[in-house]
């Protein structure tokens, strides 16, 4: 069995933490964000991950080394290269029923990062109650970037609030905000069908406001 390392800074300067999601966990997920020099190891339960995600279900099956080692009781370390360590930790805490550790209000950027990871691991069904909470219209959005993040989240989460998110963005954005997303590190992956719809709705919203004056 692996011993639990302490939190701190590794020799190569990477910020490091160890967290326990399940005290009887049988796998360690090592989440690393290279650009940010951040790493977190999480003691997790492969059974919970398997139930929540088809991707993890395949990974921990008897056909893969990770699954074979779990069955042997080796507590394998599985490396996950992710864009956002914080978002991945939050997602995994939710899957492990650690809701008490999670703030009810989360920044749009982090919600979008979780949506990307949920889409990657096919966890939307397991996150459904949280998705509807995060994607509601009460979320405060003050910048075009935040509006873009929430559009991405509602789209990737397959939220029922997507139409409302488009209308809300159109009311607050300027037409040149939408094309600017194409150069954004994260928002550039938004599909053109979605951004095109937002652009059209934005122009219409501005036209309607001008007609009222």
Image (cartoon, helix red, strand yellow):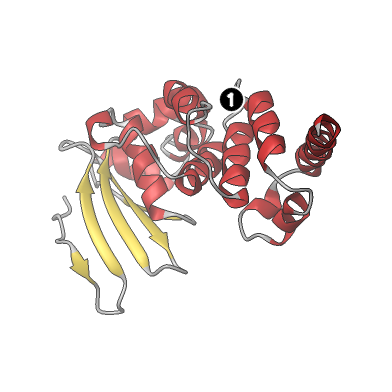
Q: In which quarter of the view is residue 102 placed?
A: top left
Left or right: residue 22 versus residue 48 is left
Q: Which residue is mark 1?
A: 159
User: Can residue 175 be seen in the rendering of this structure?
Assistant: yes
In the image, is residue 176 above or below residue 90?
Answer: below
In this rendered view, identify the residue nearer to me: 37 or 59: 37
In the image, is residue 129 above or below residue 166?
Answer: above
In this rendered view, identify the residue nearer to me: 140 or 196: 140
Residue 83 at x, y percent in the picture: 49, 57
Residue 192 at x, y percent in the picture: 80, 44
Left or right: residue 54 versus residue 171 is left
Q: Quadrant of the C terminus?
A: top right
Residue 101 at x, y percent in the picture: 24, 37
Residue lying at 30% horizontally and 77% vertically, measured from the top left = 13
Residue lying at 37% horizontally and 55% vertically, measured from the top left = 31
Residue 78 at x, y percent in the picture: 37, 51
Q: In which quarter of the view is residue 2 placed?
A: bottom left
Q: Residue furthest bottom?
A: 12
Left or right: residue 105 versus residue 72 is right
Secondary structure found at label 1: loop
Q: In which quarter of the view is residue 100 placed?
A: top left
In the image, is residue 161 above or below residue 44?
Answer: above
Label 1 packing within 10 angstroms: few (<14), some (14-19), many (20+):
some
User: Can residue 79 be seen in the rendering of this structure?
Assistant: no
Residue lying at 64% horizontally and 33% vertically, measured from the top left = 155
């Amino acid at each position: 069995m692996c011993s639990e390392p302490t939190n701190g800074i590794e020799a190569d300067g990477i910020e490091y933490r160890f967290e326990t999601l399940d005290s009887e966990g049988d796998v360690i997920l090592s989440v690393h964000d290279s650009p940010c020099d951040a790493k977190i190891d999480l003691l997790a339960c492969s059974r919970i991950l398997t139930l929540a995600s088809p991707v993890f279900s395949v990974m921990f099956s008897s056909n893969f080394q990770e699954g074979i080692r779990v069955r042997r009781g080796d507590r394998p370390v599985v490396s996950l290269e992710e864009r956002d360590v914080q978002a991945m930790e939050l997602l995994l805490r939710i899957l492990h029923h650690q809701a008490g550790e999670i703030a009810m209000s989360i920044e749009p950027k982090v919600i979008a990062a979780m949506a990307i990871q949920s889409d990657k691991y096919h966890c939307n069904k397991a996150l459904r109650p949280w998705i509807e909470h995060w994607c509601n219209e009460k979320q405060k959005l003050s910048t075009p970037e935040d509006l873009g993040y929430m559009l991405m989240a509602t789209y990737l989460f397959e939220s029922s609030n997507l139409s409302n998110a488009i209308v809300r963005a159109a009311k607050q954005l300027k037409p040149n905000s939408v094309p600017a997303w194409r150069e954004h590190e994260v928002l550039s992956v938004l599909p053109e069908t979605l951004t095109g719809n937002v652009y059209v709705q934005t122009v219409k919203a501005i036209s309607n406001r001008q007609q009222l004056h």
